[in-house]
Image (spheres, rainbow, N blue to C red):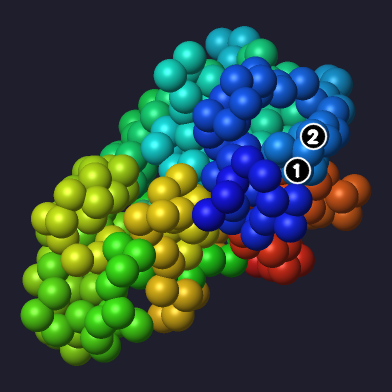
């Protein structure tokens, strides 16, 4: 790989360079929200700017609580590059963070009035039920089991469970080639539930965070990490010389925004917001400026399913 010289670098190479921007030339990473172009980094699309709605009122206990508190509390991930990531300075970035910001804006909350809280996969339902977060935006698959405890707006994105392996692995091509292998996933995830099925005949390691699984994969402690392709592509893009995504998704994971199960007015308002930002182009623009940098192509927004 020649990350600093080739103008015809692949999307993943461009991304890897963007992610570790200072490694090539010592030039500081650009942080402003406008398009940037440099011979070393390639094109970096701008993030959208979301118009904040004024005087929002509808019959939602969650909205009333947030308005009284002067902040909207949103649960997110912090270790998923290009989706929900927090850097060493505390700055959050990624597609889910943008989805959270665009919805908050439609509810009348500018970014400065959002309190982001890191909640990992296994803590989501409990933190929503306890009211610790008003909304949750973090690679959260909508399914019937979870709908018993959580209200979902969306979907706003469609992922699929896939496998992350070491770059030199030639033995794993999909879930049915995992017999005798050790696979890491995260407690409470749909991916862990899937890979534990007897069909696959594999040994599982359960972690609290995907970044912990990736550390084990890099260190040789496990043979694969399984979760959504969108998440895995972010990790692969961070270590393109060491890791690769198999690219053979074996489930469907529609991502929704989680909230209190009984707050139907909020659910409707968030679904409205998802549709509005799809129609005005913010969704695609946000995607291209975040998840798109990990090499995944924008494939349209799934139809919102109201219930
Ligand atoms: N989308 C899957 C889930 O909601 C896996 C990703 C995650 O753990 O957030 O379980």
Q: Percent x, y for residue 202? A: 13, 77
Front residue of 86 and 172? 172
User: In the picture shown, does residue 111 fall above or below 166?
Assistant: above
Front residue of 65 and 210? 210
Q: Percent x, y for residue 110? A: 73, 19
Q: Is mark 1 within 8 Å of ligand 1?
A: no
Q: Is mark 2 within 8 Å of ligand 1?
A: no
Image marks 2 and 1: residues in contact by CB distance under 8 Å = yes
Residue under label 2: 38
Image mark count: 2
Q: Is residue 77 visible?
A: yes
Residue under label 1: 42
Q: Percent x, y for residue 174? A: 34, 82
Q: Secondary structure under badge 2?
A: strand
Q: Is residue 206 left or right of residue 288?
A: left
The residue under the point 72% across, 62% down is: 298
Q: Residue furthest right?
A: 280
Q: Secondary structure under badge 1?
A: strand
The residue under the point 15% across, 56% down is: 220
Q: Is residue 220 left or right of residue 81?
A: left
Task: Give ligand 1's quarter of the image.
Answer: bottom left
Front residue of 146 and 297? 297
Q: Is residue 260 left or right of residue 25?
A: left
Q: Is residue 304 visible?
A: no
Q: Percent x, y for residue 214? A: 28, 50
Sort mark 1 into few (<14), some (14-19) or many (20+) by Cα contacts within 10 Å: some
The dot on residue 272 is none
Q: Quadrant of residue 82?
A: top right
């Amino acid at each position: 790989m020649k990350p600093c010289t080739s103008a015809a670098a692949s999307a993943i190479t461009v991304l890897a360079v963007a992610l570790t921007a200072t490694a090539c030339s010592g030039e500081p990473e650009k942080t402003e929200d406008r398009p940037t172009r440099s011979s070393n980094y390639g094109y970096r699309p701008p993030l959208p700017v979301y118009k904040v709605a004024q005087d929002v009122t509808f019959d939602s206990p969650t909205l009333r609580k947030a308005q009284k508190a002067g902040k909207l509390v949103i649960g997110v991930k912090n270790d998923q590059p290009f989706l929900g990531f927090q850097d060493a300075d505390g700055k959050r970035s990624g597609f889910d963070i943008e989805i959270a910001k665009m919805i908050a804006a439609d509810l009348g909350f500018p970014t400065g009035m959002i309190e982001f809280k890191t909640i990992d996969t296994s803590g989501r339902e409990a933190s929503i039920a306890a009211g610790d977060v008003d909304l949750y935006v973090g690679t959260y698959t909508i399914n019937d089991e979870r709908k018993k405890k959580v209200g979902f707006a969306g979907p706003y994105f469609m992922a699929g469970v896939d496998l992350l392996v070491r770059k030199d692995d030639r033995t794993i091509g999909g879930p049915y080639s995992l017999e005798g292998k050790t696979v890491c996933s995260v407690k409470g995830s749909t991916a862990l539930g899937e890979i534990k099925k007897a069909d696959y005949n594999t040994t599982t390691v359960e972690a609290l965070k995907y970044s912990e699984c990736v550390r084990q994969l890099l260190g040789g402690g496990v043979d694969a990490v399984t979760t959504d392709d969108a998440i895995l592509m972010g990790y692969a893009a961070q270590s393109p010389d060491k890791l690769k995504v198999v690219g053979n998704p074996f489930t469907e994971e529609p991502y929704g925004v989680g909230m209190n199960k009984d707050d139907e007015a909020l659910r409707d308002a968030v679904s409205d917001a998802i549709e509005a930002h799809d129609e005005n182009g913010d969704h695609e623009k946000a995607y291209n400026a975040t998840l798109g940098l990990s090499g995944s192509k924008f494939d349209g927004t799934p139809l919102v399913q109201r219930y």
